[in-house]
Image (tube, rainbow, N blue to C red):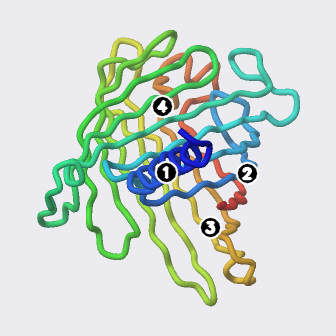
Amino acid sequence: MSRFATGLSLAATLLSGQAMAADLLQWQDNSLTYLNGIDFKVDPPRQQTLTFEHASGWSFGDLFIFVDGIKYNTEATNGANDGHSFYGEISPRLSLGKLSGSDLSFGPIKDLLLAATYEFGEDDVDSYLLGPAVDLNVPGFDFFQLNTYYRETDGKRDGSGVWQITPAWSYTLAVGDSDLVIDGFMDWVVDNDDSYHANLHFNPQIKYDMAKAMGWGKRFYVGVEYDYWSDKYGIDDDGYVGDEILGGTDQSAISLLLKGHF
């Protein structure tokens, strides 16, 4: 085969691969968020966080990934005697509607899915979650998901064999020449294991698109994040450890937020 024919074959292979990838990947969005907050519990009360987020839609479902890099302000350390930490989640979902090529919507339900999440972080805290999910058509919302998971943990982390309900949502309001976005999630662990208490983690963000207001182009938000977590990490606030050593485990923290999309 001549070099020319070889080049054509290679180019065709590359173009075919790109076309296949384009067919699989329908959309994607990436962002970086900076948070500076106070009133955290269990961990040091003042924290700075840099978060990378990726969201994408595929021909077979969707994917959400985030990774937090956390720096504790002043000289405070966490339970592992570190002045910093990290945590992340990888959450793919398979769409039964897309895989079957059928419209599965009925009533307020847009689609049926199989959701999974892998949680990872410092000091051997891996968890694996799997369960059914629905996408809901809620008037006014950009999206509204309702995911249910059965949790299994690995390593040192407690909380195996319990169920978790996780709604996630986004709502956009037009404000002047720009948008105000209210989005977030809630993780509700509804039952206990031997050493892990049922808990609820509610984490909304309220943010204003400064880039759209100023004509800068790509989205750049300023706002706040509120973080409420009852019985944080599954530690019972009514127990001795929660009351006497940690100063309670019910968290109500607030952070200033800067978020840029790219």
Locate residue 225: give its quadrant: bottom right
**Circles 2 and 3: CB atoms closer than 8 Å:** no
The residue pinned by badge 2 equals 34
The residue pinned by badge 1 equals 12
Q: Could you say which is closer to the camera, residue 34 or residue 212? A: 212
Q: Residues within 10 Å of mark 4 (few under 14, many from 20)?
A: many
| Mark 1 / mark 3, whichever is N-terminal | 1
Nearer mark to the viewer, of 2 and 4: 2
Give the x, y percent position of residue 77: 78, 23
Q: Amino acid at mark 4?
A: Asp
The residue pinned by badge 4 equals 231
**Circles 1 and 3: CB atoms closer than 8 Å:** no
Most extreme residue toward the front is: 2
Residue 207 - label: 3
Nearer mark to the viewer, of 1 and 3: 1
Give the x, y percent position of residue 164: 33, 35
The residue under the point 53% across, 36% down is: 250
Disc 2 is placed on an element classified as strand
Residue 251 - label: none
Give the x, y percent position of residue 144: 35, 60
Q: CA distance from mark 4 to mark 1?
A: 57 Å
Position of the C terminus by quadrant: bottom right
Q: Amino acid at mark 2?
A: Tyr
